[in-house]
Image (cartoon, helix red, strand yellow):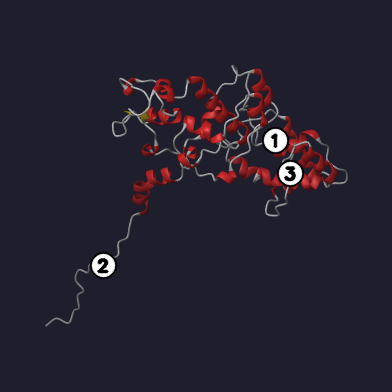
């Protein structure tokens, strides 16, 4: 009899996976999961308010005219007009319930203006499943209500053009909009400032106080250079270049600290009174990048928001 011991085949329940193969398998899921935008077709309102002979051949404006919110129509057409989510007719509604083209245009402009000046969608209301609480809805500029006479509640403009949570509809579309045919009043208002530049505003209007150290003077000069330059998409929050955070840190937090360091209390109070700032900045000690900022503007780039 042999004294040699043999183990034989052993089946373990533990499985070792190939990391490279796993990455290839999951890449598409990671890509999708990393995005904060994207609209689920199940969230669309594809019930028309009027008879439509063939929605599969209808233009986006025709779909909007039939009562489908225009953002919904854009998503549906972008998806290839899927048969799994057909446009259907609601016989209980009639043409009078559809917003006219002028109303849709006003709502689209309202949303565009808010994205350019505040980098956020208006409050969409609970019916749209928005992620923004009513208490956190943005402040509406007087320009929209008084000059443009758009006085309805902000949710009414959103429901005119969108039936789903607007956060899923990427706001980067504003970058491709051309300004050349805009009204003079609108262009003049945009010239007063766009999103991403509020905290730069004081550096364009005020000189720094005396006796500050050299590093703060350099930081002040950097902020002033950016403030004096025409606004660019590289700084606008909707399209901001990720390299900005790497190079300069959180702009708003650092600029708030810098304002407190380089201006007098009297200057800051005047800024708040004149609405250059919404309120006196609150110091955040975790954001200290500004202490080592150099003067060169390496973040603005040449992708200007307002081109000739």
Locate residue 147, reporting x and y percent.
66, 24
In primary-sequence order, the first of circles 1 and 3 is: 3
Give the residue displayed 71% in from the left and 54% down from the top: 285
Q: In this view, does 76 lie above or below 129?
A: above
Q: In this view, does 303 lie above or below 129?
A: above
Give the residue displayed 55% in from the left and 38% down from the top: 123
Closer to the camera, 163 or 254?
163
For this orientation, the residue located farthest to the left is 1
Locate residue 66, reporting x and y percent.
39, 23
Q: Nearer the observer, disc 3 or disc 2? A: 3
Q: Nearer the observer, disc 1 or disc 3? A: 3
Closer to the camera, 127 or 203?
127
Badge 2 local density, few (<14 within 10 Å), some, or many (20+)?
A: few
Could you tell whether 154 is left or right of 85 in the image? right
Q: Residue 12 carries which label?
A: 2
Could you tell whether 284 is left or right of 207 in the image? left
Could you tell whether 20 is left or right of 157 in the image? left
Q: Residue 279 carries which label?
A: 3
In primary-sequence order, the first of circles 2 and 1 is: 2
Marks 2 and 1, how far apart at CA: 60 Å
Closer to the camera, 29 or 182?
182
Badge 3 local density, few (<14 within 10 Å), some, or many (20+)?
A: few
Locate residue 206, reporting x and y percent.
81, 36
Q: What element carries label 2?
A: loop
Give the residue displayed 39% in from the left and 29% down from the top: 78
Residue 215 showing in the rendered view: no
In primary-sequence order, the first of circles 3 and 2 is: 2
Q: Which mark is residue 57?
A: none
Residue occupied by mark 1: 297
């Amino acid at each position: 009899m042999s004294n040699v011991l043999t183990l034989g085949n052993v089946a373990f329940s533990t499985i070792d996976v190939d990391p490279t193969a796993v990455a290839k398998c999951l890449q598409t899921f990671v890509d999708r999961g990393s995005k904060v935008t994207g609209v689920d077709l199940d969230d669309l309102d594809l019930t028309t308010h009027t008879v439509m002979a063939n929605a599969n051949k209808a233009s986006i404006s025709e779909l909007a005219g039939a009562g489908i919110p225009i953002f919904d129509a854009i998503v549906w057409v972008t998806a290839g007009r899927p048969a799994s989510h057909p446009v259907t007719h609601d016989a209980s509604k009639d043409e009078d319930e559809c917003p006219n083209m002028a109303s849709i245009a006003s709502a689209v402009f309202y949303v565009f203006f808010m994205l350019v000046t505040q980098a956020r969608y208006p409050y969409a209301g609970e019916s749209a499943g928005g992620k923004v609480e009513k208490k956190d809805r943005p402040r509406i500029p007087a320009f929209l209500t008084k000059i443009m006479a758009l006085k309805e509640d902000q949710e009414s403009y959103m429901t005119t053009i969108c039936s789903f949570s607007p956060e899923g509809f990427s706001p980067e579309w504003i970058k491709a909009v051309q300004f050349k045919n805009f009204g003079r009043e609108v262009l003049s208002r945009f010239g007063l400032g766009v999103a991403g530049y509020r905290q730069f505003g004081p550096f364009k209007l005020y000189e720094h106080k005396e006796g500050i150290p050299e590093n703060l003077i350099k930081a002040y000069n950097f902020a002033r250079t950016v403030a004096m330059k025409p606004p660019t998409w590289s700084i606008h929050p909707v399209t901001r270049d990720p390299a900005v955070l790497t190079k300069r840190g959180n702009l708003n937090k650092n600029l708030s600290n810098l304002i407190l360091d380089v201006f007098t209390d009297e200057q800051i109070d005047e800024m708040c009174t004149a609405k250059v700032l919404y309120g006196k900045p609150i110091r955040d000690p975790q954001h200290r990048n500004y202490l080592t900022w150099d003067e060169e503007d390496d973040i603005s780039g040449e992708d200007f928001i307002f081109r000739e």
